[in-house]
Image (cartoon, helix red, strand yellow):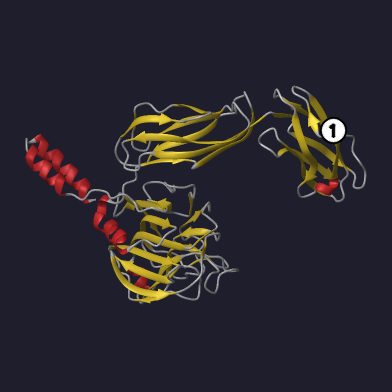
């Protein structure tokens, strides 16, 4: 916020010719700081509910507003308070988050700028949550649920890294002012720590990993129903799969309104093309480059290597909030597994951005790749359907095994003419029948193990027992 005011002031100065004064004023303002590593989710609250480093997008429930924050904008929840019944408030606002986090982590940090509404704290000692990953049916002792960060009225701050039976820290959160609130935990040391405005205020010792499979919520905890709602504002909420150090936390706090540099994101982190016939080109898969910073980013180069290629809509520079698309393809020239990178070089602080690429070349062509048997009475056998296997190489293909595998493998059977070898340029057939053993959807796959590359190859099988 201070830097924005400085920019406005400079604009006025420039109009009256005070260039040197303007330059000096801007030089005194804090600059953004690069975020620490292991950042897996970041909700800035800048006019949307996006996670700008992952795919953990938020969905607002009831009236979540955007207001001026410590850094740009912030989420405003349930202002002005107080909430009279924290366990029964169908109109209270919160944010439900899609969970695409790792299943667990050995260390965690939850960090946010928070602004607690004093009216709520004075009204009653309600519990209010900034961030939770909690399930009432599962959470209890240490190691049973994800991190929870919040407050209990005017009396204490709550930081529970991996359970629901621990982690209440004495001392009140300042109200009606922005506070940088951080909880960290490292299972290696067992140390759980709470920081306010860059300073360590208390430590406790716990044990065990941190599950991240529980549903994430911003501004609420789910029990028998949504409950214990935040009243106030939340800005720059972040989740790390590491315990930030005291220096890292202080650096973020000292950046103040300049915040952490938001740079450029390139998603997804990985693209797999699966098995592709040698000499052919895969269908295109897309990566998206997005400028989540507040300044224009210059794009210097976009590159792939080996048997991977790319085309893109990224021209020269990318304005704040804009994105462009990179289409990637895989054209194997030989059998076997291949890997490479999509590499973007630009002027962002976090350049280069990388997407890992993988695929497998194969000389084995299967037509079709899926057989659907439709409805069949339980205990009766369908007519056979066939798959053609073609060896597209100039050498004989060795077949090690052809089998049925998968959940309902006992409902399908196969015979084939392939034997142990298929000559160069030759084909054989695999005949499959469906004999359902139970009602409902049934699924399995034909699995072929061979030396043609990309082994095992698979053909999906489906049917419905009636």
Residue 384 relative to residue 329: left or right: right
In the picture of the structure, the residue carrying the numbered disc 1 is 385
The part of the image, by quadrant, that contains residue 158 is bottom left
For the residue pair 190 and 360, the one nearer the viewer reads as: 360
Residue under the image location 93 percent in, 43 percent down: 380
Above-or-below relation of 192 to 428 = below
Residue 293 rendering spot, x and y as whole percentages: 33, 42
Residue 320 rendering spot, x and y as whole percentages: 33, 37
Residue under the image location 23 percent in, 48 percent down: 31
Residue 440 rendering spot, x and y as whole percentages: 81, 48
The mark total stands at 1
Residue under the image location 77 percent in, 44 percent down: 444
Residue 39 rendering spot, x and y as whole percentages: 41, 53
The part of the image, by quadrant, that contains residue 127 is bottom left
Residue 340 relative to residue 315: left or right: right
User: Callout 1: helix, strand or loop?
Assistant: strand
Q: Would you call the spot at circle 1 few (<14 residues within 10 Å), some (14-19), or many (20 or more)?
A: some
Above-or-below relation of 41 to 455 = below
Q: Can residue 313 be seen in this view?
A: yes
Above-or-below relation of 59 to 226 = above
For the residue pair 74 and 353, the one nearer the viewer reads as: 353
Residue 366 relative to residue 437: left or right: left
């Amino acid at each position: 916020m201070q830097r924005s005011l400085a920019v406005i002031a400079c604009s006025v100065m420039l109009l009256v010719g005070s260039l040197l004064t303007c330059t000096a004023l801007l030089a005194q303002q804090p600059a953004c700081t690069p975020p620490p590593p292991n950042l897996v989710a970041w909700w800035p609250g800048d006019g949307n509910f996006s996670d700008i480093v992952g795919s953990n997008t938020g969905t607002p429930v009831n009236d979540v507003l955007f207001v001026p924050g410590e850094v740009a904008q912030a989420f405003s929840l349930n202002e002005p308070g107080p909430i009279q019944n924290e366990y029964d408030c169908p109109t209270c606002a919160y944010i439900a988050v899609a969970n695409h986090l790792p299943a667990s982590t050995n260390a965690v940090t939850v960090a946010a700028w928070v602004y607690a509404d004093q009216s709520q704290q004075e009204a009653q000692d309600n519990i209010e949550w900034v961030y939770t990953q909690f399930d009432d049916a599962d959470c209890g002792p240490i190691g049973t649920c994800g991190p929870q960060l919040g407050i209990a009225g005017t009396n204490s701050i709550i930081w529970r890294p991996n359970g629901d039976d621990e982690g209440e820290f004495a001392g009140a959160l300042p109200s009606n002012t922005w506070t940088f609130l951080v909880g960290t935990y490292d299972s290696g040391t067992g140390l759980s720590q709470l920081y306010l405005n860059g300073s360590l205020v208390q430590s406790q010792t716990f044990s065990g990993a941190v599950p991240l499979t529980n549903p994430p919520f911003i501004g609420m905890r789910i029990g028998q129903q949504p409950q214990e709602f935040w009243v106030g504002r939340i800005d720059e909420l972040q989740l790390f799969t590491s315990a930030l150090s005291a220096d890292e936390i202080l650096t973020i706090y000292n950046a103040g309104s300049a915040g952490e540099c938001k740079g450029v994101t390139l998603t997804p982190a990985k693209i797999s093309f699966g098995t592709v016939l040698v000499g052919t080109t895969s269908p295109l898969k897309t990566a998206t480059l997005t400028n989540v910073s507040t300044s224009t980013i210059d794009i210097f180069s976009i590159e792939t290597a080996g048997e991977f290629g790319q085309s893109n809509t990224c021209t020269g520079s990318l304005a704040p909030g804009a994105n462009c698309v990179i289409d990637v393809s895989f054209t194997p020239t030989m059998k076997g597994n291949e890997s490479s990178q999509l590499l973007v070089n630009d002027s962002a602080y976090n350049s280069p951005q990388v997407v890992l690429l993988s695929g497998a070349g194969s000389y084995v062509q299967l037509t079709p790749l899926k057989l659907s048997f439709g409805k069949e009475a339980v205990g009766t056998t369908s007519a056979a359907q066939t798959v053609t296997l073609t060896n597209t190489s100039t050498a004989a293909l060795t077949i090690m095994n052809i089998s049925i595998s998968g959940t309902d493998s006992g409902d399908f059977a196969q015979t084939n003419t392939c034997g142990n070898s298929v000559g160069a340029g030759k084909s054989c057939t695999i005949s499959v029948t469906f004999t359902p053993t139970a009602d409902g959807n049934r699924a399995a796959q034909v699995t072929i193990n061979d030396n043609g590359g990309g082994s095992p190859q698979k053909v999906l099988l489906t049917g419905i027992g009636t």
